[in-house]
Structure formats: structure tokens, C-alpha cells
């Protein structure tokens, strides 16, 4: 069928007695709001199809902010997730739904999202996958930070030195310590997207929370609440 798009459902909510409003992330069109008429009917052929983490081919019509679904079929079975891995995947969906504007293409970010889900499926610890995706998301949003050079001197980051983060400037060598202080070792790990120690992971998490805060606003993420009673070993 012509015009099919690879998509994932980020979130859905009931609409009227039989329909669903879908928050969708598509490969070529980015985030979309799509009405699926009759999807909640007992005999609907979409029953169980429009679920998060199921790769889909979708087609829709409409030029306004609300599209209308005309076709959906699974590309493969839903990616198998459970426990805190599932909650981590819900976190990715919520962040995308919060920060992406509708009808803005992000084809490379779509592949980053797909790769993050695949990595989560195979992970014992979700944190490296979450941090890599957050950093990719910041890059696609235009958040350009140089982790490899001191913003003050332009010199390469020294593994043994400490640097303070300054918004819209970068990392500046400093002897001061605090929430915005990172070691050179931590910055090099973030730049490489490779986290070999718990310290590097914690630093990456601290940085992405700082950097994503202006995009997410003050409203708490619901997916983070899922982790509170369950486990301390979360990627949130």
C-alpha cells in the first residue's frame, strides 16, 4: 500500500465511546495526533494493535492538527519488555510526547528511538540506553554542547580536571564544586556515549536532567513516578 509510514504509538486516550486519539511518532513526519475511529469497538480489527512499542505501518488523511487514521498494521510483534525496562520505555515515550512539536520531521531521531528500544529489550540496566537516547534527542533539538573542549580556553578537556557547566556556553575549567561541576573523565564519557563506571552514568544523568529541564517545563513526568515504589535501580 502506497503512503505507509513506519510509526510507533507513544500514547493513546479514549475519544467518544468507540474511538482513540493517538500520539504517534512517525519516521518521516515526526510527532502526530491521529484519530482512530472505531478502534475501541469489540470487533475492530485494530483491537490490540495500536499499542506502544509495536512497530507499525500507518496511513492517515487530513491537513489539520488532527489526522484521521485510514490504515494500520503491525510490522512485527511488540517488543518484549517488563518491569523497570518497560517503565524506562514509557519514559522515552513521555519525553518525546512532551518535547517534540507536531509535524516536524525527525527521521534520524526515529532510528535513535528504535535503537534505544532494541537496546532496552536486551539490557539488564536501562541507564546507558536512556542516557544515549537523551543525548541524541538533545542533539536533534539543536542543543549543541562541546564536551571535548573548555569553553573558556578552547583547550581539550583534561581527564583529571574539573569543569563547571554554564548554560549556552559550555564547560569551563574551575576549582569550584557543585551540581554543575563535572570531571574531565565524565565529560569524555558523555562525549563518547560510553559509560563504563557508575560515576560516569550518574554524571550523564545529571547533565541530561539539567539540559532537558527547559524543554520539559515544571510539570513532573508521570513515568518517573512508576519507579518510586518499585526499584532503586532505575534509569529515570
Image (cartoon, rainbow, N blue to C red):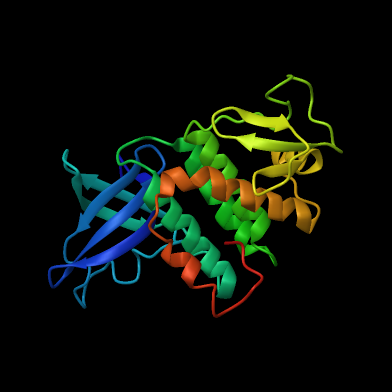
Q: Quadrant of residue 23?
A: bottom left
* Residue farthest to the front, as pictured: 176
Image position of 177 (left or right of 212):
right
Quarter occupied by the C terminus = bottom right
Q: How many marks?
A: 0
Image position of 14 (left or right of 110):
left
Image position of 77 (left or right of 135):
left
Determine if residue 184 is in view: yes
| Image position of 180 with respect to 141: above or below | below
From the top left corner, tell me how far across and down residue 209 is, in percent. 55, 50
* Pick the front one: 170 or 88: 170
* Residue farthest to the right, as pictured: 160
* Pick the front one: 174 or 220: 174
Q: Residue at x 52, y 33 (%)?
A: 143
* Residue farthest to the left, as pictured: 16
Quarter occupied by the N terminus = top left
| Image position of 133 with respect to 225: above or below | above
Q: Residue at x 38, y 35 (%)?
A: 105
Determine if residue 75 is in view: no
* Pick the front one: 134 or 160: 160
| Image position of 84 with respect to 229: above or below | above
Q: Quadrant of residue 135?
A: top right
* Pick the front one: 60 or 23: 23
From the top left corner, tell me how far across and down residue 119 is, in percent. 63, 56
| Image position of 60 with respect to 89: above or below | above
From the top left corner, tell me how far across and down residue 118 is, in percent. 59, 56
From the top left corner, tell me how far across and down residue 210 is, in percent. 55, 46
Q: Quadrant of residue 189?
A: top right
Q: Residue at x 63, y 54 (%)?
A: 129
Image position of 152 (left or right of 95):
right
Amino acid at each position: 500500500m502506497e503512503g505507509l509510514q513506519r510509526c510507533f504509538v507513544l500514547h493513546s486516550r479514549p475519544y467518544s465511546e468507540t474511538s482513540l486519539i493517538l500520539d504517534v511518532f512517525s519516521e518521516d513526519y515526526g510527532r502526530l495526533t491521529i484519530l482512530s475511529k472505531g478502534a475501541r469497538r469489540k470487533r475492530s480489527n485494530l483491537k490490540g494493535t495500536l499499542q506502544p512499542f509495536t512497530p507499525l505501518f500507518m496511513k492517515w488523511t487530513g491537513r489539520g492538527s488532527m489526522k484521521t487514521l485510514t490504515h494500520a498494521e503491525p510490522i512485527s510483534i511488540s517488543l518484549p519488555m517488563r518491569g523497570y525496562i518497560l517503565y524506562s520505555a514509557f519514559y522515552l515515550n513521555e519525553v518525546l510526547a512532551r518535547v517534540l512539536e507536531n509535524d516536524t520531521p525527525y527521521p534520524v531521531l526515529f532510528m535513535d528511538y528504535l535503537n534505544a528500544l532494541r537496546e532496552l529489550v536486551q539490557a539488564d540496566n536501562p541507564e546507558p540506553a536512556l542516557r544515549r537516547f537523551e543525548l541524541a534527542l538533545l542533539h536533534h533539538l539543536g542543543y549543541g554542547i562541546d564536551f571535548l573542549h573548555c569553553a573558556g580556553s578552547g583547550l581539550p578537556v583534561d581527564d583529571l580536571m574539573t569543569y563547571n557547566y554554564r548554560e549556552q556556553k559550555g564547560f569551563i575549567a574551575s576549582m569550584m564544586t557543585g551540581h554543575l561541576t563535572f570531571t574531565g573523565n565524565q565529560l569524555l564519557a558523555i562525549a563518547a556515549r560510553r559509560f563504563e563506571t557508575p560515576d560516569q552514568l550518574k554524571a550523564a544523568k545529571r547533565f541530561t536532567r539539567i539540559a532537558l529541564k527547559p524543554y520539559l517545563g515544571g510539570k513532573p513526568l508521570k513515568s518517573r513516578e512508576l519507579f518510586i515504589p518499585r526499584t532503586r535501580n532505575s534509569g529515570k
